[in-house]
Structure formats: C-alpha cells, structure tokens
Amino acid sequence: MAKIPKVLHEHIDTAFPANVCLLGSVLPNGYAQVTPRGGTMVYDDEHIGLWERGSGSSAEAMRDGSKLTIYFRKPSLREDGVLPRGGLFAIDLVPDLPRWAEYDRRVSLTGRRGHGTIRLTESVRQDRRKGLTVFDQEYEERRGTRTAVKRFSLTFRTISVAQMRRRLERAGFRIDAVLGDYDGGPFDDRADVWIILARKR
C-alpha cells in the first residue's frame, strides 16, 4: 500500500479552509461525485480519515471496499521545497464523452439531504465542430416551502492519447506508462479508460 509522506501529514490535517481536500467517489448510477471535505485528516501512514457529519450521496456511496480518491493541492509546498521534483503525475482521460447521446433535462439524481430533498436535472450537448461535450446542470434543493435552484455547465474537450503525450512532453514530462484500466492493464484505443503516468524531467 502507498505511504502518505510524513512531511504532508500536518498539511493535510490543516488543509481546511484554504486548501480543502476533495473526496471523489462513484454514485450507483455511474456518475462521479466530488465534494469538499473539511474534516479530512491523516489517520496513519497508510490511511486517510474522514469526519462524516452528513448523510448525503457521498456518504451513501461509501461501502466496505469502495474506491475513493482524495485530492489535496497546496501550491506553496512546491515553492517552499517541501515536495521533491520527480513526483508521479497521473491523468485520467474519458474517451467515451464524444459518443454520449444528447438529451434534454433528464433527472439523473434524486435523494434526501437533512430534512430536505435534492434533485439534479441534466442536459447533454455535443459540439462536434469544436470537439466539445457540454453538461448543463440544474441542482434543486427543497426544504419545506423553500426551493433553491443553482444552474451551471461543465464543458469537456476530448483529445487523443497521442495529443496528450505530446503536450506533456512539451511541458517537460517523461511518460512512464499508458494504461487501459485502473488495474494497470495495457492501453487500447477501444478501452473505456485512458490513463497516462508521467514524471517531471
């Protein structure tokens, strides 16, 4: 199992609020769920602890054996010389986005939050000329007679592994591996996942 460097323990424990950690999980419908977690802490050299105070969809997605991703970013660590050069950089491309069918106002998530209910309504648009996939999201939360609605869009541009390799190499990275799944399987153009591992030269 990978070790959490001791030099990072205190930085992770005190990340909130300036550099709050993000928790990534997968919902039952296959969608990614990424939420900020101010209660993230280092339990020991091999484990991250979460102070779970809510009962939202992220908590429901966590079961014994569930795969989670903790994202911690603090740029000043590089500037201060805390993080050594040569660290591993991993990028996960999503090759199937250009193949997604377009649809309008589909309810993709419903559930409860505290004493209220939540609903996520989604539309998908494809801009073939620009190579863009656009997700228009409408998040609605109801508590009693009050309803709050937030609308936002997520835009993705899918490029090939060869294009991404060239960009990384121009940016000073050395490619260590190109994988086709999360278990380290070989890359194939038809794979559902494209993963590139690289190191800064």
Image (tube, rainbow, N blue to C red):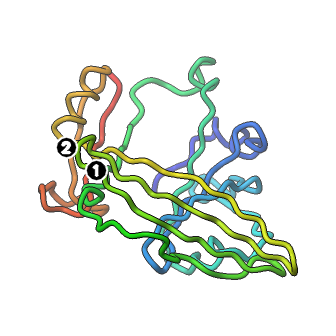
Q: Of circles 2 and 1, which is in front?
A: 2
Residue 69's place in the image compared with 75, above or below, is: below
Mark sitting earlier along the chain (2/1): 2
Given residues 44 and 103, the one toward you in this image is 103
The dot on residue 160 is 2
- Counting the numbered discs, the total is 2
Residue found 76% across the figure and 56% down from its top: 39
Give the quadrant of residue 182: bottom left
Q: Position of residue 133 (x, y in %)?
A: 35, 52
Is the residue marked by circle 2 packed among few (<14), some (14-19), or many (20+) residues within 10 Å? Answer: few
Residue on which disc 1 sits = 195
* Cα gap from disc 2 to disc 1, whole angstroms: 11 Å
Give the quadrant of residue 196: top left
| Callout 1: SS | strand
C-beta proximity under 8 Å, tags 2 and 1: no
Label 2 amino acid? Ser
Q: Position of residue 20 (x, y in %)?
A: 70, 45
Is the residue marked by circle 1 packed among few (<14), some (14-19), or many (20+) residues within 10 Å? Answer: many
Residue found 30% across the figure and 49% down from its top: 127
Q: Is residue 116 left or right of residue 187?
A: right
Q: Is residue 192 left or right of residue 18?
A: left
Residue found 23% across the figure and 62% down from its top: 99
Quadrant showing the N terminus: bottom left
Label 1 amino acid? Ile
Residue found 85% across the figure and 73% down from its top: 146
| Callout 2: SS | loop
Q: Position of residue 151 (x, y in %)?
A: 62, 57
